[in-house]
Image: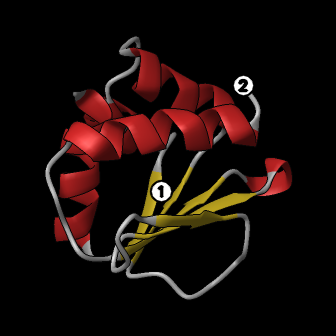
Amino acid sequence: MTKQEIISKLQDKLKFGVPFQAKVKFDFGDDGIVFIDTMQSPPAFSENDDEADVTLACKVETFEGFLNGTKDPNMAFMMGQLKVRGSMGLAMKMNALLED
């Protein structure tokens, strides 16, 4: 899955998901970063390594599993496949968004 495909899926999920006001960064290591600023309407997406309220770090393959429903973000976190930096409350909101 490319970053553009990830951004497209996240845009779709944000249209119908739980609204929140935050800056979220998805860190895919060597595969790059997806940054979402939901403080704007519509949310702004970029590949910049900007300051975020919460950062979720994992492999692209793991994140793809979250998006297609084959991997549980909670289990990935407990198994060390998903790292969270910043607000755990926002991470839980992202979890709800990803699982929808």
Label ID, residue 83: 1
* Residue type at the position of mark 1: Lys
Vertical placement of 80 versus 43: above or below? above
Secondary structure at numbered mark 1: strand
Identify the residue shown where x is 34% and y is 37%. 13
In the current view of this chain or complex, which residue is farthest to the right? 30
Secondary structure at numbered mark 2: loop
Identify the residue shown where x is 25% and y is 29%. 99
Q: Can you give x and y, in whole percent of width and height, for residue 74 in the image?
A: 26, 37
In the current view of this chain or complex, which residue is farthest to the bottom? 51
Residue 75 shown left or right of residue 32 in the figure: left
**Residue beneath disc 2:** 1
**Tally of marks:** 2
Lower position in the chain sequence, tag 2 or tag 1: 2
Residue 88 shown left or right of residue 24 in the figure: left
Vertical placement of 97 versus 28: above or below? above
Nearer the observer, disc 2 or disc 1? Answer: 2
* Residue type at the position of mark 2: Met
Q: CA distance from mark 2 to mark 1?
A: 20 Å
Q: Can you give x and y, in whole percent of width and height, for residue 44 in the image?
A: 52, 68
| Disc 2 to disc 1: CB gap under 8 Å | no
Q: Residues within 10 Å of mark 2 (few under 14, many from 20)?
A: few
